[in-house]
């Protein structure tokens, strides 16, 4: 019988998770189908009942469900609890288990370009993805972490949890970070082209990582490239968290090259 997996999000159609995981299933001859589950927040409870009833094997979880799904799961691990967001669910013989691989996505994407230990890190945003970025920076012993957000109150709340600095985007100019992680949703859908940090504050010595991959070249990536900074675009995080999720679900080694090819073929 074909096993069902899927991306749970709203909207979901921009996601490259189905292309990435279906390519991996095919390469390893796993009889499974990775679907799109575009579920509105008010329909989440009903959807989880369907997951249980239809024995859906695994989910990637994206905005806006990463936090709200927690109360419907049977168990979440320590990491997801600390980050307060779930981005992968496994149906383990009827028990829905939640974890978070976004922090691995951040960590492994950064480590391809820079060390994190001893570095000054700015995280833009204070939602679930930002929390995963701070978790990754902490775990890799960054020297200092600043959380900058549109709503400073949200930054303050997250900073309190991780014991780091916080502020608004205006504070960027006084920090001069080594690493900048763009973890807001400003850059996709109707927020394409939104400027969070003025171009003049991005410099050659920085590594600038973006989480958004649709579009691939966002405003901050364009400006960082123009400044001569090293850049990491959003598909790297998608792939690195996807590799970890694939192993979690299937207990098989992920076919990295196949998954990369599927993502790059489908990128706009
Ligand atoms: P979230 O919890 O909804 O948080 C959204 C964040 O964006 C908040 O900090 C919010 O600020 C900020 N924001 C929204 N609109 C803004 C605007 N117009 N100007 C400035 N800031 C704005 O979302 P999330 O789950 O953390 O996801 C954040 C982004 O990361 C999304 O674009 C998502 O697609 C991306 N992501 C990518 C991957 C990947 O694998 N590549 C994985 C995870 C997430 P306020 O607090 O002021 O509302």
Image: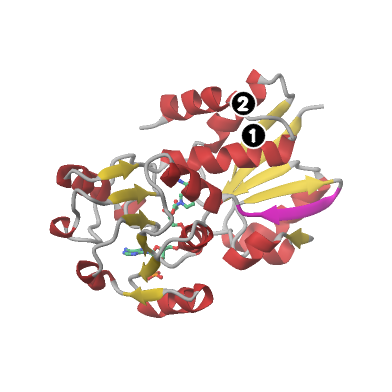
Q: Residue at x 75, y 54 (%)?
A: 97
Q: Is residue 214 left or right of residue 6?
A: left
- Packing grade of label 1 (10 A; few <14, some 14-19, many >=20) is many
Above or below, 34 against 232 in this view is: above
User: How many marks can you see?
Assistant: 2
Q: Nearer the viewer, residue 61 or 156?
A: 156
Judge: label 2 CB < 8 Å from ligand 1: no
Earlier in the chain: of badge 2 and badge 1, it is 2
Residue furthest toward the right?
93
Residue numbers of the magenta segment? 94-100
Residue that numbered label 2 is attached to: 24
The circle on residue 34 is 1
**Magenta-colored segment: predominant secondary structure:** strand
Left or right relative to 261: residue 149: left
Q: Residue at x 18, y 53 (%)?
A: 203
Mark 1 vs ligand 1: CB below 8 Å: no
């Amino acid at each position: 019988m074909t096993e069902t997996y899927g991306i749970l999000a709203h909207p979901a159609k921009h996601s490259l998770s189905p292309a990435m995981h279906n390519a991996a299933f095919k390469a390893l001859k796993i009889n499974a189908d990775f679907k799109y589950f575009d579920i509105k927040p008010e329909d989440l409870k009903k959807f989880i009942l369907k997951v249980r009833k239809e024995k859906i094997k695994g989910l990637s979880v994206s905005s806006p469900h990463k936090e709200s799904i927690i109360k419907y799961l049977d168990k979440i691990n320590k990491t997801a609890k600390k980050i307060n967001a779930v981005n992968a669910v496994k149906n383990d013989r009827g028990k829905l288990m939640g974890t978070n691989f976004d922090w691995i996505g951040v960590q492994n994407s950064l480590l391809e370009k820079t060390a994190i230990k001893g570095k000054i890190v700015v995280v833009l945003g204070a939602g679930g993805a930002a929390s995963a970025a701070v978790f990754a920076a902490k775990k890799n012993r960054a020297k200092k972490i600043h959380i900058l957000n549109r709503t400073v109150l949200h930054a303050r709340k997250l900073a309190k949890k991780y014991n780091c600095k916080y502020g608004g985007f205006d504070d960027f100019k006084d920090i001069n970070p080594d690493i900048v992680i763009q973890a807001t949703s400003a850059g996709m859908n109707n927020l394409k082209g939104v400027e969070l940090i003025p171009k003049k504050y991005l410099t050659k010595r920085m590594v600038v990582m973006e989480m958004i991959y649709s579009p691939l070249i966002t405003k901050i990536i364009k400006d960082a490239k123009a400044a001569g900074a090293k850049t990491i675009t959003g598909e790297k995080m998608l792939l690195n968290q996807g590799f970890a999720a694939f192993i979690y679900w299937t207990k098989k080694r992920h076919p990295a090259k196949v998954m990369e090819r599927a993502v790059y073929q489908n990128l706009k």
